[in-house]
Image (cartoon, rainbow, N blue to C red):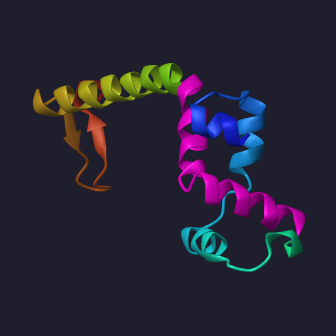
Amino acid sequence: MLDALHDGQEASVETLVRLTKITRAQDEEAKIIQFSGNADKLANAESFLYHILRAVPTAFLRLKAWLFKPSYHCEVIQLKEHLKTLEKGCNAHVTGRFGIDRKTGHMTNVSAIM
């Protein structure tokens, strides 16, 4: 795993998901990195984290970035669809096709009322 982190070799999505689940808060990572005792006396999980974080302090940021890469294209498509919806709503508002219902304060489609 350390070689992959150092060399930028990507792992399977399943492995990345599992590894990102053990991510610690920044203060916990700092404590693990600053540990100066015998690493062999740490529990297995802490020892694993200690060795990874000592070798690659940004290991979990790299893992998250690698995990995002496969889903990037789908995320962009989804965001574009949301932006189109927002644009249509803004255009409808600007052209006056929507009005505000004075009783409820909600936006309504003026063409549906008329």
Q: Nearer the viewer, residue 71 or 37?
A: 37
Find residue 68 and report its image quarter. top right
**Above or below, comparing residue 48 to residue 110 in the picture:** below
Q: Is residue 13 magenta?
A: no
Name the residue at the left extreme: 95
Q: Is residue 90 left or right of residue 21?
A: left
Find residue 34 and report its image quarter. bottom right
Q: Nearer the viewer, residue 10 or 74?
A: 10
Q: Residue at x 20, y 32 (%)?
A: 90
Q: Is residue 40 left or right of residue 17?
A: right
Q: Residue at x 22, y 53 (%)?
A: 102
Give x and y (percent) for residue 111: 24, 24
Specify the quadrant that holds the N terminus. top right
Give x and y (percent) for residue 46: 79, 67
Secondary structure, magenta segment, majority class: helix
Specify the quadrant that holds the C terminus. top left
Give x and y (percent) for residue 99: 20, 39
* Number of disc labels: 0
Q: Is residue 51 magenta?
A: yes
Q: Residue at x 68, y 48 (%)?
A: 20
* Residue interval drawn in magenta: 43-71
Q: Residue at x 49, y 19 (%)?
A: 73
Give x and y (percent) for residue 57: 55, 56
**Above or below, comparing residue 65 to residue 71 in the picture:** below
Q: Nearer the viewer, residue 108 or 69?
A: 69
**Above or below, comparing residue 53 to residue 95 in the picture:** below
